[in-house]
Image (cartoon, rainbow, N blue to C red):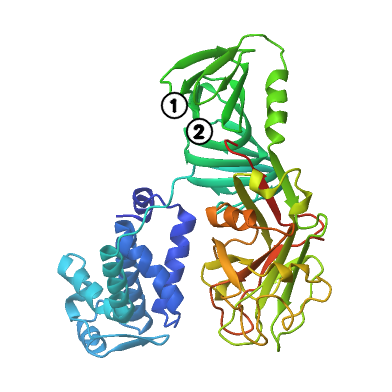
Amino acid sequence: MSRSSDSQESGLNSLENEEFFAQVDRLLDGAVDEALEAEVMAQVTRDEARKRQFAERLYLNGMIGHTLQGVSLADGSELQQALAMPIKKSGTASGAVPPWLFSVVSVIAILAMFAVTYQTSARWMRTAETVASQEKNTPLSAPAPVVAILTHVGRCQWGSNAQPTSVGTALHAGTVELIAGVAELSFVNGAKMKLEGPAVLDLVSPMRCRLASGAVTMSVPASAQGFTIESPTGDVIDYGTEFGMRVEQGRAHVQVFQGEVEVASKNLKETERLFQGHATTMTTTRIDVEKQPNKEYPSLEEMRAAQVAMKSRHRIPSSEGNGAAEYVYSPGSYNNMSETLLLVKHQAEQSWRRIAYLRFDVSKLPETVKDYNAVSLTLSFVPSGIGYASTMPDCDFTVYGLLNEEADSWSASGLTWENAPGINGEEDLNRSLVVPLARFRIDRDETTGVRVLATPELTEFLKQDTNGLVTLVIARDTLGVGSSSLVHAFAGNRHPTVAPPSLEFRKRGE
């Protein structure tokens, strides 16, 4: 078979063929290059056309070798004497070949030449066979399908994402958490989404996603009809249109800018068709459809209801009133004192330990702590610039409450390892002086993110407060080894761009 037919059969162009022949020639000339050998053998073992090209090159190499040695094909005696001895050409050896090798009518002669000249590459051919055998017996996991491409990230601040956050990167099935900003996603089916932070979006497939909170606007072409956005109270099924959707406070708002959508309640098993200018609110108990074009949405009544609901919530940052945020480091640690970060680290060695302290002034609540039914703690973590994440596994943390209320008056400016409440001298955190309230994990690949912690233990601890101040302590449970292990960092009260730690108090039903 000719090279051109080989090229057509294997789907390779002539330039690729010439590069392949050049690689083979280098090896036959005695080049010692394991990477080159592996590359050639990978092509030979996976492509039938490459195998034939390889055999052709070996045959041609043998013919040239004998010609360069001055062997006359017409002189039988000289040929036999020459071929009876090994031939060396540029460091490459070939074994003896029978004198009838060059009979142009003998197929056996050609096969014999191939077999003998093949010995010049026997070592790396055997290696290739081994590699091919291993590849055959080792199943390759299929890559995760791409759901969408991230096409814009204007002023975005991201939460705890396993997804990439750079423009042009592929997004797979999984959660996208956007703290602030507007991100644009282009789905592989042609649908386009603008995600407005704060928002939490679960990508399921190119035709389905779940909006847990936040707002999106969609532009869906005919090719993506049937695209569905799920929410806690109901789903929106698109029929080639443009619409907006917002999920907040246990309800989903949908507004159609152009075209048609269908909304389907999860609990009521009801559906409604919406057209341009229509809007709806879905709750767990009803679907309210508004058919007044050019009306601002949500309605004024709903906004007033939301304002009333917000009065039953209250957020207190650690920077408010007599609140404070600081960290302490163990004796022998290098002083990486930061004005903006709360550094946390736990080591197998005594040195390089760090623990963060938070104080909240709950006296600033409009009512007593006991009047609230649920409390959550929000922490934002950022890069510390100290240590290497690659040296660590996923890391677990515990938030503790300080039991001794008399120690709540600690001074942030004078806090040290020796006088920090809950630490006895050079020992680590004394578990008899604190109580665990919540636990969380930061994956090794996460450099920035947010954790919102809401546990019955945290709520009960705060309800027991009597002096208007509460102290929380953040410690890492996962051990690091050596000074190169990662130091985790949380935004403190003076971080220039990230919010400080905060407590949110909610009444029943919120």
Please give the label number shown on residue 28. none
Residue toward you, 175 or 249: 249
Residue 400, by quadrant, is: bottom right
| 457 with respect to 503 (left or right) | left
What label does residue 266 carry, if any?
A: 1
The residue identified by callout 2 is 232
Neighbor class of circle 1 (other Cα within 10 Å; few <14, some 14-19, many 20+) is some
Q: Which secondary structure lies at badge 2?
A: loop
Taking 67 as reference, is 489 left or right?
right
User: Is residue 342 positioned above or below 418 on the image?
Assistant: above
- Amino acid type, callout 1: Lys
Amino acid carrying label 2: it is: Pro
Q: Circle 2: is it few (<14), some (14-19), or many (20+) Cα within 10 Å?
A: many
Pick whichever, 55 or 258, lies toward us. 258
Kindly indicate whether the residue at mark 2 contacts the one at mark 1 (C-beta within 8 angstroms): yes
Check the image and report above or below for 434 versus 351. Answer: above
The image shows a total of numbered marks equal to: 2
